[in-house]
Image (cartoon, rainbow, N blue to C red):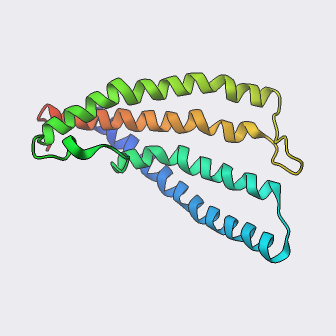
Amino acid sequence: MKISLESISNNIDNITEHIGKLISWLVLVLVILVGYDVFMRYVFSSGSIAIQELEWHLFSIIFLLGAAYTLKHDEHVRLDILYRSHLLNEKHRAWIDALGSLLVLLPFCLLIIISSWPFVSQAFIHNEASPDPGGLPARWLIKSMIPLGFCLLMLQGVAETIKKTSIALGNKQ
């Protein structure tokens, strides 16, 4: 069975797309949760530490797991002064993207994955919980989103590198 780089890229894209769409529902959950929290605080003068922590946990999950989806759809922030100018054609841009992924994105993701692993494992081993009364337990769950999010971003970076290298070499339009 022959596996092509294009099929690997397509499979990664499909995974990223499904995860991105799933994560997008968390935005709705977060909006509802924040609305509930504000309503309870201002109408009934009743707040909850657990609700507030859940809000930032959801935001963290959206941000970390949504980064790969954002990369797939080329919606990350970049400085477009030169990149989008008439001085660069599609092949030049593809080389910039491919080399940027290889030299910056992928090593950075690997660095974060490796350096965050002890952070997550220590939280798991010590069964770390919120230090605040009424806070959430199992803090390792939210901390585990750091290496998971960067694994997904690195995978999508591989897919983008494959696509951009193909364009740069003139194999794909």
Number of numbered callouts drawn: 0
Q: Residue at x 48, y 24 (%)?
A: 110
Q: Which residue is located at x 27 percent, y 27 percent?
A: 99
Q: Is residue 125 positioned above or below 19 on the image?
A: above
Q: Who's the residue at 78% across and 73% down the image? A: 42
Q: Nearer the viewer, residue 27 or 83?
A: 83
Residue 98 appears in which quarter of the rendering? top left
Q: Residue 134 in the image: x percent, y percent?
A: 88, 51
Q: Nearer the viewer, residue 116 or 12?
A: 116
For the residue pair 77 and 81, the one nearer the viewer reads as: 81
Left or right: where 28 falls relative to 161: right
In this rendering, would 64 be left or right of 37?
Answer: left
Q: Position of residue 156 (x, y in %)?
A: 40, 38
In this view, which residue lies farthest toward the bottom? 43
Q: Residue at x 89, y 48 (%)?
A: 133
Name the image quarter holding the N terminus: top left
Residue 172 pos. (x, y %): 15, 40
